[in-house]
Amino acid sequence: QRRHGLTLARNLTCTEGEFLMVAGAAARIVTAWMSIGLPWGVSKILRHFVESGRVALEEWSHLALGLRFRAAAMGVPFLPTLTMLGSDLMDVGGMKRLQDPYTGATLAAVPALFPDVALLHVHRADVFGNCQIDGYPHMDADIARAATTVLVTTEEIVGVEETRRRPERTVIPGFVVDALVLAPFGAFPHECYGLYEADFDHFADYTRAIDARGPAAVADYLERYAYAPPTWGDYLDLFGGERLALQQRRARELTGE
């Protein structure tokens, strides 16, 4: 849609942050970390855009940013915590200090963060938008409840009897979901727990291109993988069935299924 001036907020930001910066969509990044993973270090694209002054970086601790979503999900203006106290990060986001009325101790007051739009991917959902996540659900439940508009992609759409059979896995209730899209392999080339693993060879090629050409490499990547494919199926065809099947096998090896 070629939007501009957006703020991206996510605890552990990855290639999506790089894409939005290179596309000119993101003007501010609110995060605790941006990287594909430890082997590649902190995003060189982030460094380029922040150090050149083209994108503002608002850095929080991982816990503090999670508590911001939790506060918004609870409908309270802030939550008290100890995280970030004594660090320079206290000044980055303008976080306030308060006194514990019971002990007199100094606490940090983490302000609620209410996203305008949340983009989430889940393992399965029923036609009413009740979404289930296998494995670690991260902060998706809080983010969904905190956001004004919630857009969800799902690996599969199942019958209501399936979500009722395993209600403990429904972490996002349908009444907070505004739109649901069927997108198998919707997280690829990243992983979706138990279904497919991340394609590290693909990321190695991606980061080598960045090492050689900087943001221009990401712009070319967007042209090939984001703008050019007319359908989701065409996007997946760029990876090929064998590559997708390999990551499925690796996921089953990790889960023992």
Image (tube, grey):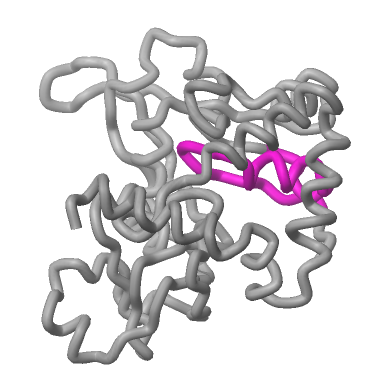
| Image coordinates for residue 26, horizontal then vertical, percent | 74, 45
- On-image quarter of the C terminus: bottom left
Camera-side residue of 35 and 188: 188
Which quadrant of the figure has residue 61?
top left
Which quadrant of the figure has residue 62?
top left
Residue 70 seen anywhere in this rendered image of the structure? no
Residue 67 seen anywhere in this rendered image of the structure? yes
Which residue lies at the image location 54% right of the left edge and 39% below the top edge?
13
- On-image quarter of the N terminus: bottom right
Residue 114 drawn above or below residue 1 = above
Q: Is residue 134 left or right of residue 86?
A: left
The residues colored magenta run 4-28
| Image coordinates for residue 17, horizontal then vertical, percent | 65, 42
Q: Is residue 178 magenta?
A: no
Residue 88 drawn above or below residue 240 = above
Which residue lies at the image location 52% right of the left edge and 28% below the top edge?
33
Camera-side residue of 46 and 81: 46
Residue 19 drawn above or below residue 45 = below
Q: Is residue 149 left or right of residue 69?
A: right
Camera-side residue of 159 and 83: 159
